[in-house]
Image (cartoon, rainbow, N blue to C red):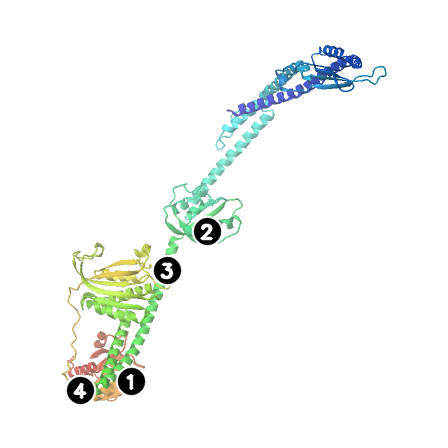
Amino acid sequence: MPVNQRLATKLATYTILLGILMGSIVSANQIHNLYLNTTKAIDSRAVQLIELTLDAAAEAVYQLDGKIANDLLNGLMQYDLILESAIYDELGDELARVTRPRIEFSGLSRLIEIKPIEYNYSLPVRNGTKVSGVFTAKLDVQAGLAPFYNLAVSAAVAQILQAIGTSMLVFLIVVYLITNPVGRLANALSEIDPESAERLPIDRAHKNDEIGNLINSANRYLEAVSKNQRELFDSREELQDILDNLNEGVITVDADGMIVSANLASEKMFHYKKDSLDGTPFLNLFSDESLESVDDLIHLVQNEIDLPSFRMTGQCQDGRQLPIELIVSLSSNPHSLWTIRDISAETKADSDRRTLESQLRQSQKMEAIGTLAGGIAHDFNNLLSSLTGFAELAKEEAKNGSEQQDNINHVIAISGQATQLIRQILTFSRKREEKKDNVNIIDIVDNCQSLIRQTIPSSIALKSKYSAPEFTVFADETMMQQVMMNLYSNAAAAIGNETGEIFVSVDLVDATPPTSNIKGDYSRSVRKYNKIRIKDTGCGIPEDTLHRIFEPYYTTKEIDAGTGMGLAVVHSIIENHQGWIEVDSSNHGTQFCIYLPCSEKTSKTLEVSEPSNQCSTNGNERILIVDGSDEITRMLSRMLSKRGYKVETSPNGIDALNRFKKDPTNIDLVITDQTMPGKNGDVLASEMLAIRPDIPIILCTGYSEYVTQDSALSIGIRKFMSKPVSNSALASAIRSVLDTPIEPS
């Protein structure tokens, strides 16, 4: 319905209602006055008739004549409005009574019930006599008002119709002068487009009155609004272009936490379609663990508290999470402006930097451990050399089969175990290139088991079972040791301080390698494999992380408790040896199964024949012993003297060189340590050889990071030996060097 019709309808309705109300008020006043006059006339007429009968009624009472009283009352009842009349004597006894039924009313008279009026009159005294009585009558006023009702209805209807007519006339005038123009103006205003219209599509018939002023004002308003709309649209487009070209997300949030607007970077960042972020809850952009923090931030912003930037985890529409930085800008309106920056690259860079720093610290730590291990190995090997040498001297003097000789044998055996322990420590602390050879995997398992036994709680039992005494693998022994040590360490960590067990078994099985482990021309066919099974009774690996344990840098350990490289390195080593790993874990423990192909290659290691006990190791040559350890020089001097040699000792390289310079031909053989105060063994050997090129020199070292067998032989040293050296091995080496002439150069 058009605006002017709605307004006219309301105006007509109100006008008619007002006319009816005014007509009703006037009619009610007229009817009230008519009612008062009518009832007053009825009452006056009744009183007149009754007063005319009082004297006759008194006479009838005086004479106590009921007939006269009855006739009198019947005459009075000729007046239709009298319902009942009665005469009582002075004693109150009824002398006469006449009644008639009440008229049945209809129409409006029936709806309004008026009770009859009762009249009681004491009869007048007659001739001074005290004899008197009572006259009563009931007047039916409602019956007397019947003509009044009809007249009242007619008057009311006439008055209301007159008021309605007057109202309709006023209505038509108002509609013509006001309603229709206002309606046309309202319809024109409702139909215009404020973004494009500049004037109202309406005539100017009322240009000199209030309607005309209103139209002119509306046109001026439309022109201003249209101009502002164009400027605002241009500014909004320009601002939106700027926001969409930002790398950071910019989101406007209202007081209820709903997104009002978001730029293109926000939609791309959280993987939403264009314009699909508008009207969604701001908290939808954050992970569950960040919701509480963001909700607190929103409350702080609503309280106009200035906040710094915050880093938390965002949630994309596809469920992917990403690290973000959140910056909020306060404003005077209820909306808040949030800047969101994707810091995935920074987080990864920080993580990579921390990883590199951790690797550097680990490398430096390992380098320091290697240096420390080298120093400890040197000193410890010197002690073992002395211990082993003196034990062997004591064994030679002990009676064969005696308890003393058996005790010495135990000392020598334990010294050999200590020597092996030191060699294992050096193996794990040195950097070396891959050197594959045929190795017995059982020896590696046993050695690693002995080494790990020193570092784990005694509550963890180490058990092993081998189905054969030897399982040969063509592998780098040090790398295999690294694999076993890592798996042993992880198993021990899984058990912790609880009572548990680490069980290792080695078996020969037929197996087919997985496709992912085929490298080069390696055939994916069924063949023999050495299966190494390492099983622990620890806490197990959670199912949701089991598939990630071989990822580089992934670890479930606490910060600084592990780099996450252990199992990744193990996986890489096994794959480089054409093998693979299978893992099975539960809350009762974890089992690693390593499959390595059986060796099909010939060993590169040359067999070193043990010195024959039948060859004599005695002699009478002159030997110079150079060593910083008094115990070693004392032990070697005693051992070689017993074999007939003439022995001289020197505590360091400088003293030994000075002695040698005095008479180079007086020495037949030099046995020197490598690491000594003042001058190392290789330097001493070089300077001696420069004086006398044919001098036989044996270099013995507890540990040297710089001198190897190849480098020692290259400078002219005849024999390179690692401490501790048994007396028999050293005696055989001495005889070998002395009895082998130097070939002329």
Marks 2/3: CA–CA distance: 30 Å
Decide if residue 386 is on the left or right side of residue 223: left
Crowding near the residue tagged with mark 4, few <14, some 14–19, many ≥20 C-alpha atoms within 10 Å? some
Q: For mark 2, what is the residue? A: 292
Query: Which residue is nearer to you in this view: 459 or 275?
Result: 459
Measured from the top left, where is residue 684 in percent x and y?
A: 26, 81
* Identity, as a three-letter code, of the amino acid under mark 2: Glu
Nearer to us: label 3 or label 4 = 4
Q: Secondary structure at mark 4?
A: loop
Where residue 631 is drawn, which disc sits there? 1
Most extreme residue toward the left is 614
Q: CA distance from mark 4 to mark 1?
A: 22 Å
Disc 2 to disc 4, how far (Cα)?
87 Å
| Label placed on residue 32 | none
Sequence-wise, which precedes: disc 1 or disc 2? 2
Q: Neighbour class for label 3 at 10 Å: few (<14), some, many (≥20)? A: few
Q: Which residue is mark 4?
A: 618
Q: Nearer the viewer, mark 3 or mark 1?
A: 1
Q: Which residue position holds label 3? A: 353
The secondary structure type at the circle numbered 3 is: helix
Q: Is residue 455 left or right of residue 125?
A: left
Q: Residues within 10 Å of mark 1 (few under 14, many from 20)?
A: some
Callout 1 amino acid: Glu
Do tag 4 and tag 1 residues touch (Cβ < 8 Å)?
Answer: no
Q: SS class of the residue under badge 2?
A: helix
Q: How many marks?
A: 4
Label 4 vs 1, first from the N-terminus = 4
Residue at point 51%, 29% (across, down) = 190
Query: Image quadrant of residue 370?
Result: bottom left
User: In the image, what residue type sits under mark 4?
Assistant: Asn
